Image (cartoon, rainbow, N blue to C red):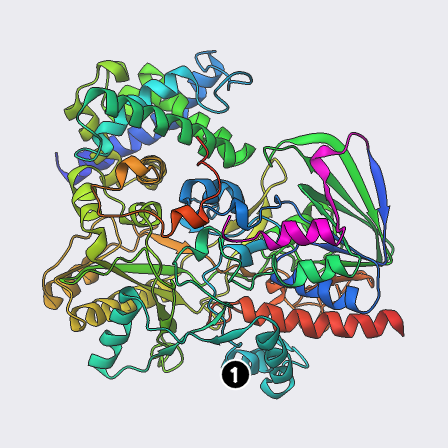
Amino acid sequence: MAIPDLFKDRAKSENWQITDAGKLDKNITVEADVIIIGTGAGGGVSAEVLSQAGLKVVMIEEGGLYTSDDFNMDELEAYGTLYQEGAARATKDGAISIFQGRAVGGTTVVNWTSSFRTPDPTLNHWQQHHGVKGFSPSEMAPYFEQMEKRLSVAKWAMPPNANNDILKQGCQAHDWSWAVIPRNVSGCWDLGYCGVGCPTNAKQSMLVTTVPEALKNGAQLFYRCSAERLIFSEHKVEAVECLALGSDGKTPTGVKINFKAPHIVLSGGAINNPGLLLRSDAPDPHDRIGKRTMIHPVNASLAKMDETTNPFYGAPQSIYSDHFQWETQGDMGFKLEVPPMQPVMGAQIIGFHGFKLVDTMEDLPQLQSTIALMRDGFHEDSVGGTVELDHGGKPVLDYPVTDYMWNGLRKAHHKMAELQFAAGAKSVMPLHHDANFSTNLKDCKQEIDALPAELHRHRLLTAHLMGGCSMGEDEKESVVNSQGRFHNADNLHIIDGSVFPTSIGANPQLSIYALALKQASALVKTIKG
Amino acid sequence: MDRRQFLKLGAASSAALTVASVTATMSGCSESLPTTGQWKALRKSDRVFLTAVAPVMLKGALPEEPKARELAINNMLAYTDAAIFNLGPHNTKQMKELFDLLNFGLSRGLTTGVWSSWDKASDKEIENFLNRWRESSLALFNLAYNGLNKLMCATWYGQPAAWQQIGYPGPLYPEALITKPSIS
């Protein structure tokens, strides 16, 4: 084919050590210097740093190994194979859809490439309110810089697609601040299919960067290998017990793999990390595991435009506005962005049936959607959700929506409608069961104010899972210290977005990369003395 | 019907939802999930339900021509089966319970207002059921509606056959970038 599958080609020519756990026919024990559970933004960077230091690294991944030849810009195929719970993961009550990756490379394989540094106010807030040390803006700057270089992060130089351009026009009309989004791409074709796996290897996900680098350095990768339990002894993790999953990616084959190492790095992400710790009866004297899980709850507004938008093509996110992010006067802050709208993603958010659905879908090439990402975790009425285990031992997130957040969501609907009408929308509809398209701003705003603040009627979703294993120096308030070391086991480090004490206030991938670089580099020093 | 009567009906439906679904499961009316053959998650009764409801959920979208419509629905069933299986064991079980409720006469009648079997229900009855669950004041019905709605939207609009009508030309550069046929 025109595009070489770099991963597969290198795996062969460089003799990488990769094992499909589902193909093992008997139980085995694997030993290494460091075991890393998870290969997403946290695990990928950690694997690169630790293997570069000459340590024997083993990477464990629950999802499958899919590479560029497997990415066919096919939504059904991708949602079924590359996402947690077939892209149908949701909060405990089913009210908020959760889009989280599940594959070698984790969510970085399916994210939309937006790469923001952690905002200064967020870092300062962690220091002032959550007892986090070493994360001041000036201390973090070199880590952001290094990861930006490593992953080719740069402001998108091509013109934004129409979907993003409307966001820009709306902001300009209102004199709201906006800017171009930095993306982690190299030689991007501007296709628009980042969410279903990049078919050209342009996206600098962990799948094409750090995981290959670790493998080149002699690291081993076990995929379809699901971490079931950490075995704790006095202040130490002795082993990681894993279940091999069959070729369907879901069904355990019955084979168990036991991993042993002096150091364990947990990088399974929010929801799954607390899930593993809870299943393992990890020591938790202050009942902190799974608490303060943040999700940047997202609501959306749909506009019909006069012009052709083709919202399924082009870099999915290239323009954003933080105009309502920090100057909030006590309201919940939010970031404005746009989502790509391929047919399945588009149809799923509309929430109608029959002619109302079909008529709206027929306008797909003229639709524009704006989303607001609510900045949760910064206010006493926004403390996030709690991860717990269901009867089958599966982690579920109980996420309450408070009045404070409903107010923020309503304000966001108003601002999105103002933006879309200012950019020339013919009609606008907030995504809610009780909403319809309004042809002028006045009607739309009346409708927004009348919408019942009810879960299951308001279309809410999240693609940013953070927290649940908060970092901080106070053991009563956190799960790990500022270096990522678990308070109750000296050889367990948690390195990924699950340690964030609040949400980020921006798409979190670069925040995770920089944190992982910092924590893994420090871990190298600890191990090597 | 005033709001009070509606709420009363709502409460009754909610109780029926729980009781009848338990009854359906306990009384052996509930067929167990397929373990062999073509289907991994959908039972025959589930496929009958989906075949009846999909053309109403997607009214105006599915092809009119009988052969093309049959193919579209069969593809939806295959995708739905894979999708439900991919939800993982916990969610698959919840979907099974929802289908049990929809397929067991008493619970189907009480909660959906459809008293005949699904293959004999009229489009009007099915549309009333969808509206009833969508507009219900009970979150549980909204949730179930959302689940069915998303499933049917995904499995139809994910098919190339759906794309012409919505002006979606399909992925860019397919000759260079698509390396294998879609899963089916």
Q: Is residue A152 left or right of residue A403?
A: right
Residue A437 position, x and y percent, is 15, 55
Q: Quadrant of the C terminus of chain A?
A: bottom right
Viewer-nearest residue: A285 or A488: A488
Give the residues drawn in magenta, as a range. A1-26
Displayed quadrant of residue A251:
top right
Query: What residue is at 70 percent from the left and 51 percent from the top?
Result: A11
Q: In the rendered image, is residue A287 in sight?
A: yes
Q: Is residue A274 visible in this depiction of the protein?
A: no
- Secondary structure, mark 1, is helix
Q: Does residue A11 sit above or below B150 in this rendering? A: below
Q: Residue at x 29, y 56 (%)?
A: A453
Q: Nearer the viewer, residue B36 or A74?
A: A74
Residue B5 magenta-drawn?
no
Would you name the residue on which mark 1 appears?
A120
The residue located at (20%, 62%) in the rendering is A449
